[in-house]
Image (tube, helix red, strand yellow):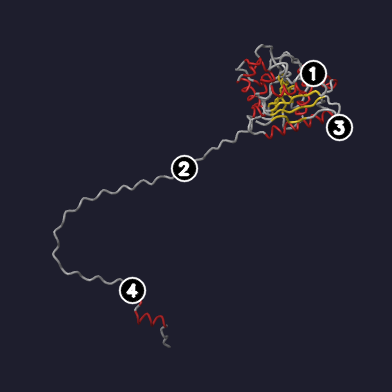
Amino acid sequence: MKQIRPSLLERAAELYDFGAALRAPAPASPPAARAPEPEPEPEPAPAATPAPVPAEPAPVLRVVPPAEPAAAPRRHAGPVAPIDRARLAKAGFVDPDGEGGGVVEEFRLIKHELLADIEKRTGLPDERNRAVLIASAQPKAGKTFCAINLALSLAGERDVEALLVEADFPKPDLLATLGLADDRPGLVDMLADRGSDPEDFVIRTDVPGLSVLPAGRKANNVPELLASDRTREVLAKLVAGDRRRIILFDSPPALMASHATVLAGHVGQALVVVRADQTTEADLRETIGLLSGCGHIGLVLNAAGLAVTGRKFGAYDGYGHDQ
């Protein structure tokens, strides 16, 4: 039988005894010695109580309330009042449902100037910036005609709600011109009753975007009511009731009653209607002085037979300064 030579690994293992490191050495026998005196056993130390492992806190679910939706405009719950369109058309007013014409275009120009001025002024409180006084020096200048037409034009804007206020307290004929009953409570009543809600006096009309506010009951102290803080509070509530709202005051002629002068301190701008064949320069200057509580005064030229621009009705020009 042929002898098989060991491999290199096997011969190296025999030569160097690689397994010695893996074998535990035999323990040496200790020398004989006298057994030591037994010592008393120490008392066993109390077993350490392991520190409690804090349990992981349960995840806290934060309930985030949904964002409140923007407040919808408040709407008076009363019936919608129909505007007498036939009466307006007969008197030459803007037709809310009709096509454009000369008067419509003129009041569009005035409207856009008015809205641009409101947009530019950021230093006034909202209730003042969005309130406009429409006045004249003397009667028969076409003040109510301009107030109604401007309100109808503003109502045609998609982002505007026009609130037309009867503020000609000595001679309130605005509602009658629109074909509405004028025996309803209104501005004077809400000023006198501090607990009343101004929205309860607003009358919605069947013209989308147009509401009206009557003058209210007769009273001898209307200028004092208008000068009170209650007026500012009422305007703030009316604007808060609908952020798109622009308030137009149809006031008495400035040279005939003090109401326009008092209201000028509550509005952001005033429009003075100037009748081309009637208003004198002296009356106009006096009127502007009486309305100086308003920082921005514009002029609306009415009944102009011929203008430099070729238009036959209307002009709007800033007169005054911004506060």
CA separation, marks 3 and 2? 80 Å
Q: Amino acid at mark 2?
A: Ala
Q: How many marks?
A: 4
Q: Nearer the viewer, mark 3 or mark 2?
A: 3
Evaluate if marks 1 and 3 touch, with contact meaning CB atoms under 8 Å apart. no
Evaluate if marks 2 and 1 touch, with contact meaning CB atoms under 8 Å apart. no
CA separation, marks 4 and 2? 54 Å
Q: Which residue is mark 3?
A: 310
Q: Residue 140: which disc? A: 1
Q: Which residue is mark 2?
A: 58
Q: Earlier in the sequence, mark 2 or mark 1?
A: 2
Q: Which residue is mark 4?
A: 21
Q: Amino acid at mark 3?
A: Gly
Q: Earlier in the sequence, mark 1 or mark 4?
A: 4
Frontmost residue, 171 versus 197: 171
Mark 1 surroundings within 10 Å by alpha-carbon count, few (fewer than 14), some (14 through 19), many (20 or more): few
Can I make out residue 206 in this image? no
Q: Earlier in the sequence, mark 4 or mark 2?
A: 4
